Image (cartoon, grey):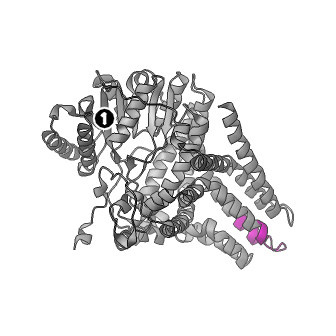
Amino acid sequence: MAIRRASVLLISLLTASGLATLLWQVLAPGGWTPAKLVMAVAFAGTAPWTGLCLANGLIGFVILMASRDPILTVFPVIAGHDAVLPRTAIAIAVRDEDMRRVLPPLRRLLRELDFAGAGEAFAVFILSDTNNPQTAAAERQAVAAFRAEDRDPARIRYRRRAVNTGFKAGNIMDFLDHHAEGFELMLTLDADSAMSAAAVLRLVRALQADPTLAIAQHLTVGLPASSAFPRLFQFGMRAGMRTWAIGQAWWQGDEGPYWGHNAVVRIAPFRAHCRLPSLPDGRHVLSHDQVEAAVLRGAGWGVRVLPDEDGSWEANPPTLPEFLRRELRWLAGNLQYRHLLRLPGLRLMGRWQLVQAILLFTGSPLYLLFLLAAAAAAATDATSPFPAAPALALTVAWLGALYAPKLLGYAEVALSPDQRQRYGGLARLACGAAAEIGFTLLLDAVSAVAKAGAMLRLAFGAHSGWTPQNRNDRGVPWGEAARLLWPQTVLGVLVFAGFAAAGWTATLWALPLAGGLLAAIPLAVLTADRRLGRWMRAKLVVAVPEELALRPQTGGVQPGPVPLPPHVMLLPLHPAERR
């Protein structure tokens, strides 16, 4: 494992060196100015994350292309088929959720487990942190009806806490302390999670086969979606996460991450070691999962990721505003990890997992700082012509490394006949990839400003809570988009005014990096527009394999056998669409 980790470090260092060389060719002509120095410092700060992206993407791509069984290569747990399954609690934490969305996937999972002859080993625990009394009453009523329809109502249980101390981590630990007696394992699900029985049993069997494993985490992909925003977002995430997860699992081994849901956990070590400490100011940790994985590995237990797409899903935010709110919740939680880096008992890889989670967000203000400094340099250095060729080479190399997992994921699908068929053919894949890449370039600029602003507020003492999420498709009015995204628009005007002073070549160079700032408001409105969502669904634009499996005759698409997601009805029609 040491050699594998050294190879990742080497790829990252070579990436940083190559990009630094290209940056030097852009900045050195005409001499150094304060703006250029800021550009160099900001660019250097993004290097660790960029290098890691290329390393994980490249390694994952090579394994996917060269290995006869890529999953077995990185998840070498040979699961047996013992007649007796360990008792497993299906724990789903909810807070102010629409139970009409939460319960159908659970019903499907229970029926599949029963059909597989495994139902007796499982029980469902719905763990509520809902504060609103009216919502709680509706929640109880929905669960009561759900229980009454089950073949064994006693295996479905409901518990509500009056106070959500410790957020989701506190909810889960309270369950383990008071309600989990007699259970050996726990399947953790989020309110928007869905899993097939086959996927759940794969994880359970893995923990049976390897008694040193504390967590088996399943790769999770997006469910088919109705609106344009999640369709575009999850199409790229699916391509990127496959290569990223396989590449990362190759060098992290049994010191992998935990994402807090769609995973099976061994209860005894989790209960013994995963009581999270309070932060220095006495507050509870918002983002718990990576800390729990690091603590378990420090205690000698293994945490592995099963990088298999089959049978594990989640819903993605339906609009840009919901996406940004989720990102800022995650940002606030991940940045708290800086207080836990010296937690006693952690291994080096456990500490790196926390650093990696921080790096996921710290690049955003540096990206924004680089753009602002570049615009200032363009506006103030009238004596030097814009270095178009070196700047283009730098941009292509930087974005290529940053998006390497996604780009190589698309390449892997394109080069595999079976994968191409699942995505509806090469032409459909290429069109989807082009649309998604354009969308991502716009989205990343918008997201960078939002994250930079959130980090600035946190630095001045603002606190972030874990607010309920809106998971329902909806339109975004122009007024709401303008109130939320005016900072991006103003910054976009300033940035492009600076580049315009250096000429049209500089302005064109800035478009892929900063164009999303000017497009932020229309991007939010259009990607939430139901008419666009209906059109994309009808034309199967950026359709995931599960959606294509539902339309075997559409446009000549003949996808191979793909298991349907537990609530493939995910493609619910809006009332306006039913008319």
Q: How many marks?
A: 1
Report the side of 29 relative to 200 (left or right).
Answer: right
Q: Is residue 313 visible?
A: yes
- Local secondary structure at mark 1: strand
Location of residue 222 in the rendering, given as x and y in whole percent from the top left corner: 41, 53
Q: Residue 531's image quarter?
A: bottom left
- Up-down relation of residue 273 to residue 94 (above or below): above
Report the side of 485 relative to 268 (left or right).
Answer: right
Location of residue 571 in the rendering, given as x and y in whole percent from the top left corner: 31, 61
513 or 19, nearer to the observer: 19
The three-letter amino acid code for the residue at tag 1 is Ile
Q: Main secondary structure of the magenta part?
A: helix
Question: Which residue is pictured at 59% across the width and 70% down the height?
Answer: 515
For the N terminus, the image quarter is: top right
Q: Which residue occupies the extreme bottom position in the image?
A: 504
Q: Residue 252's image quarter?
A: top right
Q: Which residue occupies the extreme left position in the image?
A: 148
For the C terminus, the image quarter is: bottom left
Q: Which residues are magenta?
A: 373-390
244 or 43, nearer to the observer: 244
- Report crowding for label 1: few under 14, some 14 to 19, many 20 or more residues within 10 A (C-alpha): many
Q: Is residue 386 magenta?
A: yes
317 or 551, nearer to the observer: 551
Location of residue 172 in the rendering, given as x and y in whole percent from the top left corner: 35, 32
Q: Is residue 105 magenta?
A: no
Q: Is residue 279 visible?
A: no
Please give the residue where the numbered disc 1 appears in the rendered image: 90
Location of residue 123 in the rendering, given as x and y in whole percent from the top left corner: 25, 32
